[in-house]
Amino acid sequence: MVKGLEYFKKVYDVVPGWVQKMHDYNPAMLEHYTALRGIAMAQGVLSVKEKDILLVGMNAARQYVRSMVYHTKGAIDGGASLEEIIEYLLVAFNYGGERALQTGLQSFEYALELTNTDADRFSHEASAIDIVRYYSTFTSTEKSKAYFAKLLDLFAAKDENALKSELLNSNVVSAKMKYILMTGIYITVLKNEETDYWATKSRNVGVVEEELAELGYICLLTAGIPAWFEISDALIQK
């Protein structure tokens, strides 16, 4: 088995069909893509776990299930907890609304399976407030219980501005990582002005240029070279 196929078998336990076809049609292309992915997903100023779980959140927001599910496995293999997965999926609401939360349930179901967690599955057509209520049952600390109680109150009150702000506050996941995620979402959907806006907001909560650059590398993997154009415009020139 060539290097590229071995790499993806190690990552996903099996060789995905899209990888096999890339190899069958152009083995050199797969080798180059594998090298690019290996560098982009390597430990850096962002950890491997952070990179995978960011991709989970980004792809939930833009409702790209295939990539979201692949990276759910990477996140769990990297040590992500169910509560971390939940918070990244919740942030996706700030871009994709209720539909993003419904899409994210597929990631969470897979995370339950990967962690051998016995839990009821939830309807993919459930309302946003019911999904948040469901996720609240997986909280493990009083701090998290209070956080979810506040979210549920804001959903019930339909106070969208306060809700979107609260979703970005620290709980199990830091505010810093949530702002990185928001930046990544707008990179992957190729919204230039919004990418610059969230990059600036991210800097205000302590995100550094090297982290934004690494974010750009992983966005390139899921949204192509145009994603790099978006973040490169926002990066400060060295």
Image (spheres, rainbow, N blue to C red):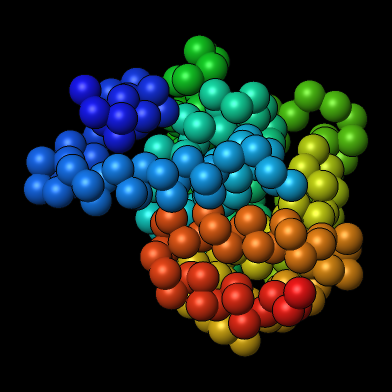
Q: Position of residue 138 (x, y in %)?
A: 68, 28
193 sits to left or right of 236: left
* The one of 83 and 127 positioned closer to us in this rendering: 83
Quadrant (top left, top right, bottom left, bottom right) of the C terminus: bottom right
Which of 130 and 40 lies nearest the eye of the viewer? 40
Which residue is drawn at the image coordinates 58% and 40% (left, top)?
Answer: 42
Would residue 35 be found to the left or right of residue 48 on screen? left
Which residue is at a point 80% across and 73% down the rendered structure image? 201
Residue 85 in sight here: no
Residue 167 screen position, x and y as percent:
75, 57
| Quarter of the view holding residue 5 | top left
Question: Quick check: 199 left or right of 144?
Answer: left
- Quadrant in which residue 202 is drawn: bottom right
Q: Tell me if residue 96 comes above or below residue 211 in the rendering.
A: below
Q: Residue at x 65, y 62 (%)?
A: 213
Above or below, comparing residue 162 to residue 190 in the picture: above
Check the picture and name the quadrant holding the N terminus: top left
Frontmost residue, 93 versus 1: 1
Q: Nearer the viewer, residue 64 or 42?
A: 42
Q: Residue furthest bottom?
A: 193
